[in-house]
Each structure stands twice: as structure tokens, then as C-alpha cells.
Image (spheres, grey):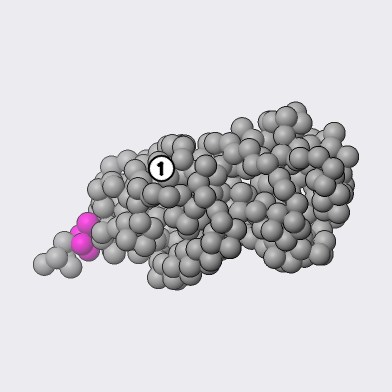
Amino acid sequence: MLLFAGTVAAQSYPSRPVRVIVPFPPGGAPDLVGRTLANRLQDRLGQSFVVENRTGAGGNIAAEAVAKAAPDGYTLLATSDGPLVINPNVYPTMPFNTLRDFAPISIAASAGLALMACPNLPVNNVADVLALAKTRKLTYASSGYGSSQHVAAELLKDSSGIDLTHVPYKGFSAAVVDAISCNVDLIFGAISTAIPHVRAGKLKPIAVTQPKRHPGLPDTPTFGEAGHRTVLIEAYMSLLAPAGTPREIIDKLHGEVAAILKEKETADRLVGAGLDLVRSSPDEFAIRLKTDLEKYARLAKALAAKSE
């Protein structure tokens, strides 16, 4: 009877508006992916999918809201990996447990990061940044403490022996304004959100954290090419529900996301923004979360990362 009830629920789902909570402000890769999925889910399923940007605490506030929501498929989390696998390893206390409190649906896209410099900073490559950092203290902006951008900077510091002052913001949009204005020297950001500012000449690209150069920034070397192979990190954007959400609903949403990612218009939109499409089953996503939690636990210990 329970199996039959779950099947019926999945067939009628969704019968009312669905909230899609994004932990970061508009303008970043998680918001782009979250809104793209929400818009197409709305079109395909004939019910409203309403995006809600709920910022703060490096994404923990939004993730906690979804973790504690009713497990009925009407509250979803569209997020980058930071709140899920990095925050638990750097914040002293967490309001949720990633493996216990969420039902993974799918990873949808990934993005390498780009290190960029304020237009007035006298640097053009990684060697220039390291040399300047030895003469004066440089600041760098990120999308928040515990974000993948923060971790990338810590990897660079560990690889090069330089010191950088972290200036965390509540998302990339706020951070990039100060970087363009040279209120901070450097900024890490997803390549997808970096490309428009680089092409407009507002920021200078230094290096990317992917293993290969990105086609959107073909003249920008990787950190590996610059001699810092450990500065390797790719953030991924995904969709999750509260733990306990009926598997039939999880599978239905996963099937819809998989179909959406095959659409040319969706692919053009996300790839054109500098993202790489990723498809994963709920079970594959669950394994990735466990693996990444373990990876960042080792990284946090090595770098003595602590919440600020």
C-alpha cells in the first residue's frame, strides 16, 4: 500500500507551486543553473517552480531551510557544492548533515574557477601575483567563507607560500563590484561568471583551476601550466530535496532534469555561460557527496581551515 501511495503521489506531483531555494544571490553560477532548471521544470510539469535566493552563512541558511522542510518534493535546493561538502569541514558547527538530511536528485553542471585581478593591479600572470605578494599584502574576494573560491585561494597560498587576505562576500555579484573598482586586488569566481567581465576588459584573467584551458578563456593558462598543479578545483551545481522525499518523486525530478540537460536551448545557455554539463543519477550524486566530504576533510586539516 505504501508503494502504491508513493506511485500515486509521484503521478500527481507537482500539484502546487514548488520552491527552489538558491543559497547565493542572482548573478552567480548556482543561480543561473537553478533558474534554468526551475523555468524548464515549470514548462515541462505545468506547475510553478519559484526560485528564492536565501543568502547568508556561506549557504548554510538556505541548506538548513531545505533540510528541515517537509519531505514532499515542494521545497528543493539548487546549490553549488560548497555548502554541502566544504562548509561541514570548515565551520565549527553545522545546522544540517549533508549525507543524512538531503536526498540527492542530480548534478547538473560544473565550473572551473578563474583567478582575476583588478584592472589597475600591475600583474598579468601567476608569477606576477606571487612576486607582488612578496612586496605587499594582497587581498582577494570570494563568494563567501568556505566557498570553492576560498578553498582555491587557500590551495594557492599553500602551493606558493604567499599570504593573501581573504575578503568574503555574500555571493559573486557583490564581490565583483569591489574587484572591478579595485577595492580588492584579486577575485576568484566561476569561469561562467568571470567570462563577461574579462571580455569587457573590467578584470584581468590570471589562471584557471581546471586541468585544461577553458574554451571561453583560451588564452588564460591553468594553474598547472603556471607550476601550481595542486590548485585544481571544479565547483558543481546540483539539485536536492529533503531526506525522506519519496523515491518516486526523486526519480521523476531526476528524469526531468536529465531530459532538460539534453535540450539544445538549455545546453547552449549553460555552455555558453562557461559551464560544463554534468549528468548523474541520484545514487551517483550520493557517492560524489561522500567522496568530496572526505576529500575536503583532508584538505581542511592540511590547511588548518577554520570558520571566521
Q: Residue at 40% of width from left, 41% of height from top?
A: 61
Helix, strand or loop under label 1: helix
| Residue matched to label 1 | 62
Q: Was residue 10 drawn as part of the magenta stretch in this picture?
A: yes
Q: In which quadrant of the rendered image does the N terminus lie?
A: bottom left
Q: Does the magenta-highlighted stretch encompass residue 177?
A: no
Whole-percent x, y for residue 280 in the image = 48, 67
Task: Tell me what residue is drawn at x 72 percent, y 61 percent.
Answer: 159
Task: Tell me the crowding category of disc 1: few under 14, some 14 to 19, or many 20 or more residues within 10 angstroms, Cα based.
Answer: many
Front in this rendered view, residue 232 or 137? 137
Front residue of 10 and 57: 57
In the rendered view, does 13 fall on the left or right side of 188? left
Which residue does the image show at 75% across and 52% down from the upper left? 162
Toward the left, the furthest residue is 1
Mark yes or no: residue 115 visible: yes
Q: Residue 289: horizontal and vertical position, in percent?
A: 45, 64
Relative to 184, is 277 on the left or the right? Answer: left
Query: Residue 123, image x and y in percent?
Result: 87, 44
Q: Is residue 63 left or right of residue 279?
A: left
> What range of the chain is rendered magenta?
6-11
- The three-letter code of the residue at mark 1 reads Ala
Q: How many marks?
A: 1
Q: Position of residue 145 (x, y in %)?
A: 55, 44
Majority secondary structure in the magenta region: helix
- Measured along the vertical axis of the image, is residue 33 above or below residue 225? above
> Residue at coordinates 69% horizontally, 31% vertically from top-left?
178
